[in-house]
Amino acid sequence: MSQSHATRNRLTRIVAGVGLAFAVVSAHHFLPSQTSALAAEAIRSLHGPGFGVVSIFVLKLGRFRGSPVARYLKAAAVTMLLAVIAEATQIPSGREAQLSDLIIDALGIIGFLGCAAALDRDIRGTIGVPGAIALTLVSIPAFGAAIAPTAWLTYALVMRQQALPQLLSFEEPWERTYANGIEVDYEVLSAPPGWPAGSGNIARVESSGGFAMMLRLAPYPDWSNYKAVSFVAATTGGESRRIELGLWGLEPADGSLAGRFYTGVRIGPAPARYCIQFEDLPGETVDRPFDLRVVSELLLAAASHETGITVLVDDFRLEHSTAECSTK
Ligand SMILES: [Ca+2]
């Protein structure tokens, strides 16, 4: 009776273990299509806390033999092996398996198992109170490092959603998580007196020569409720220059590129608000009709000769109506 009970127990643990391994590998191939680049980053950042939680399951399910310390070390080794296998399965499907992911996985495992071990009476009995204190001192920073990317990206995602319809103001540190320069990162400056979007910060974006991206925003995916995007801009150096505003969209089904749209805007030396109306998009679509539900990126780019182009920009926002847009 007790033997069949033990066998059933063992079988349950094996099934749970196989299920856990399958879930971990599947999670590495899961990327919801209707997500912005920021949300995709937030999902990717779950590596650390994810493997931390998995390591606790492995510890409980594994019921490893040996001393208390050996049980934790075995759980860490098994979870790390699972992390390596999960990363390796990504290679044939084309998603990059990255060493940085494995480092974050390891931090999650060390952080979660370390904290659990420091609270475990059997471990404290083996390594003593000084050992437990040392273990805590190592585990807490690893735990923090493992969960910090998720915490920060979640914060950025919530803040960005609250800031809508403003897309980018250059006032908040979290904006850097989804707005980047490409060749040259943007430089934040104080707005000069009389700047149309009020005081505060603006940014200097540069195209250093050739056709270069100056600013890339990976916004949220559904812009279908809006009519236009606008921003304040001025050239430096007294001349007016033509820049390109691009929108890229991703296919909802598989995340492949669904459409690209570029339009030229001539920016003058006096700061003014420029507005791109979405109803003008279909006529200028590069690939096929552009779907505003799947906007993945907004890009500023410029073609320049040797000298390069520098533009001051601020206050990118989505507009509910084009009337609202033209009055700014
Ligand atoms: Ca600003």
Image (cartoon, helix red, strand yellow):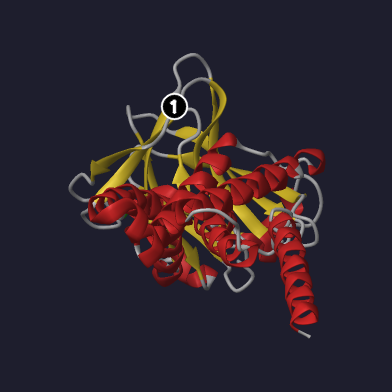
Residue 249 placed where, x, y %? Answer: 69, 54
Instruction: Please determine whether, in this image, residue 268 is positioned above or below residue 321.
Output: above
Taking the view exactly as shown, the residue that stands out farthest to the top is: 306
Residue 15 placed where, x, y %? Answer: 78, 69
Image point 70% across, 64% down: which residue? 20
Which residue is nearer to you in this view: 140 or 227? Answer: 140
Q: Quadrant of the C terminus?
A: bottom left
Which residue is nearer to you in this view: 18 or 30? Answer: 18
Q: Is residue 193 visible?
A: yes
Circle 1 Cα neighbour tier, 10 Å, few/some/many (<14 / 14–19 / ≥20) = many
**Secondary element type, mark 1:** strand
Q: Quadrant of the N terminus?
A: bottom right
Q: Dot 1 corresponds to which residue? A: 309
Instruction: Please determine whether, in this image, residue 208 is positioned above or below residue 59.
Output: above
Q: Is residue 253 left or right of residue 220?
A: right
Image point 40% across, 48% down: which residue? 176
The amino acid beneath tag 1 is Ile
Check mark 1 vs ligand 1: CB closer than 8 Å? yes or no: no
Instruction: Please determine whether, in this image, residue 152 is positioned above or below residue 3.
Output: above
